[in-house]
Image (tube, grey):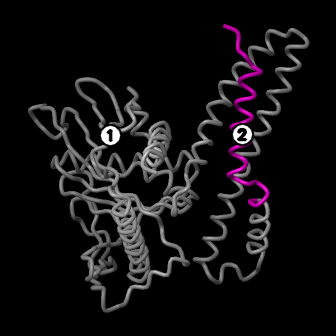
Amino acid sequence: MAVDFGSSLSHLERSMSAIEAVVDPESKKAEIAELEEQVAAPDLWDDQANAQRVTSRLSALQGELERVGGLRARLDDLAVLVELAEEEGDAESMAEAERELGRITKDIEALEVRTLLSGEYDEREAMITIRAEAGGVDASDFAEKLMRMYLRWAERHGYGTEVYDTSYAEEAGIKSATFSVKAPFAYGTLSVEQGTHRLVRISPFDNQGRRQTSFAGVDVLPVTEETDSIEIPENEMRIDVFRSSGPGGQSVNTTDSAVRITHLPTGIVVSCQNEKSQLQNKAAALRVLQSRLLEKARAEKEAEMNALKGGGSGSWGEQMRSYVLHPYQMVKDLRTEHETGNTTAVFDGEIDGFIDAGIRWRKRQETATD
């Protein structure tokens, strides 16, 4: 069947215009110019935290603008290629145009998902905590696989990450881990990954080769910013220091540099042991605690609004994805029905299809409850 280039290009043009309206390239260019002035200042690195924020924001904006501008240029070039190929009756050019149409359609659809991220904290960086749940050593091993999956996903997209705390299990894997993904909209993008993940496989830790089902929980929080003003009085925190440990409980530091903070009013406990000094670990743990308290406040506000509306939506914390490695190979999202048989690619970070489907599903849920 011949491709209807006219209809397809018109559809892509509408989608691209909608993306540009949301991204607003002109305002992004103005912000980039301001940030470039700050980067050029000789005293920028006197405040390292601010310098990292400025350079990270600049890099992210430049990347986003380049991505949108590149797609716009490709769409315009495709329209010209189609016009010339049709005028000259060039079959080879028409075949290339058809291939490029398929590629650019996929790329625009992926970018279009960004326009669906409009939540209060969606623009923030993300703080992710993964915990082994039911399933013993298999659950610990699964939790470590999920951690690697998200870190690989971030790496594939060129996003920075920072691991704050890793609690290793005795035999294999991890009990829990907390890390951040440093990219604009990381929270809005990854928040659909929150919930319980289930793994079914022949356990490599069972000498009888039996099938094992194990579970791991994923929490996704927005990273706090200076404007959040979350002040935590010293008398509301208990701060303990301890020696960092590695796999199997072995000591990886000869000093008590790891920090655990307990927020007394809520009982929230966070820890950090991946920095070199006690001071750095305390600062990192405070950032994690602030993010947890920010999310707690957001959830309470959402619950209050749902109560005023006469009902609430279903919890995202329920079981949301299954990873089956035996007796067949399948990863399936239980909310969106999105699935793939390439389990190896998923565990290597190829999860954009699941994330995009999750964002679209969430938008439909929100629209249905408005």
Q: Residue at x 75, y 28 (%)?
A: 10
Direction from residue 175 to residue 344 in the image, left or right: right
Q: What is the tally of numbered marks visible in this picture?
A: 2
Q: Residue at x 42, y 49 (%)?
A: 369
Dot 2 amino acid type:
Met
Nearer-N-terminus badge (2/1)? 2
Viewer-proximal residue among 87 and 258:
87
Q: Which picture quadrant has residue 333?
A: top left
Looking at the image, residue 245 lies above or below residue 334: below
Viewer-proximal residue among 98 and 344:
98
Direction from residue 24 to residue 319 in the image, left or right: left
Task: Count neighbours of disc 1 (C-alpha within 10 A) and say few if under 14, some if 14 to 19, many if 20 or more.
Answer: many
According to the picture, the residue beneath numbered tag 1 turns out to be: 321
Mark 1 residue element: strand
Direction from residue 134 to residue 59 in the image, left or right: right
Q: Residue at x 28, y 59 (%)?
A: 176
- Residues shaded magenta: 1-28
Task: Count neighbours of disc 2 (C-alpha within 10 A) and say few if under 14, some if 14 to 19, many if 20 or more.
Answer: some
Please state which of the two labelled residues, at mark 2 or mark 1, is closer to the viewer: 2
Looking at the image, residue 92 lies above or below residue 191: above
Which quarter of the figure is the N terminus placed in? top right
According to the picture, the residue beneath numbered tag 2 turns out to be: 16
Viewer-proximal residue among 12 and 312:
312
Dot 1 amino acid type:
Arg
Residue 73: image location, x then y, percent: 80, 38
Mark drawn on residue 98: none
Residue 276: image location, x then y, percent: 42, 75
Let me know if residue 290 is in the magenta part: no
Let me know if residue 2 is in the magenta part: yes
Residue 135: image location, x then y, percent: 16, 46
Task: Tell me how far mark 2 sits from mark 1, CA to CA.
Answer: 31 Å
Mark 2 residue element: helix
